[in-house]
Image: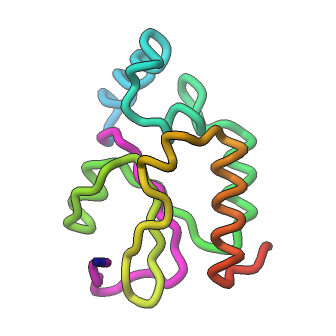
């Protein structure tokens, strides 16, 4: 069941990383991705980021979406929304509710091109016209 939030931004797509916020955590994550990529727990991070920065292809794609996009880390997500979900995942705030847009199990099977195509198609199906 979707959780109702007090003042959601209507039409917001939220990607949530399976990683905590902070410089120390970012440094540890970068090392983990480089030295042991097969055991890295955040597939979203792995396909959308290089060792230290967002991939240009992903950044450009996000900037062209017809909807506001937010990125949260696991600890930020839990604090702001009071939810503990299997991560990484994507959520859509629509009609004053937060709903799963793309679950971890499905996201974990995608490469970057598949993720982009899924996001594009799902947003179109929900009535968000391309920019």
Picture coordinates of residue 47, whole percent (x, y): 58, 35
Res. 76 image quadrant: bottom left
Q: In the image, is residue 36 above or below residue 112?
A: above
Residue in the image at 25% along x and 49% along y: 75
Q: Is residue 68 left or right of residue 127?
A: left
Res. 50 image quadrant: top right
Q: Which residues are magenta?
A: 2-20
- Magenta span dominant secondary structure: loop
Picture coordinates of residue 28, whole percent (x, y): 34, 21
Q: Is residue 106 left or right of residue 18?
A: right
Picture coordinates of residue 108, whole percent (x, y): 49, 41
Q: In the image, is residue 121 above or below residue 126?
A: above
Q: Is residue 93 left or right of residue 55?
A: left
Q: In the image, is residue 67 part of the stretch drawn in magenta?
A: no
Residue in the image at 64% along x and 69% along y: 122
| Residue lying farthest to the right in this orientation | 131
Residue in the image at 47% along x and 83% along y: 94
* Colour mapping: rainbow
Q: In the image, is residue 78 above or below residue 87?
A: below
Q: Is residue 41 left or right of residue 3?
A: right
Residue in the image at 28% along x and 86% along y: 6
Image quarter where the N terminus lies is: bottom left
| Residue lying farthest to the bottom in this orientation | 95
């Amino acid at each position: 069941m979707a959780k109702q939030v007090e003042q959601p931004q209507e039409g917001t797509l939220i990607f949530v990383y399976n990683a905590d916020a902070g410089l120390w955590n970012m440094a540890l994550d970068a090392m983990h991705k480089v030295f042991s990529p097969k055991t890295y727990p955040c597939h979203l991070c792995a396909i959308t980021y290089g060792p230290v920065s967002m991939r240009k292809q992903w950044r450009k794609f996000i900037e062209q979406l017809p909807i506001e996009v937010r990125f949260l880390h696991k600890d930020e997500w839990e604090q702001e929304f009071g939810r503990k979900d299997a991560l990484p995942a994507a959520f859509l705030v629509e009609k004053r509710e937060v709903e799963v847009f793309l679950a971890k199990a499905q996201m974990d099977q995608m490469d970057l091109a598949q993720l982009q195509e899924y996001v594009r198609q799902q947003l179109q199906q929900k009535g968000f016209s391309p920019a």
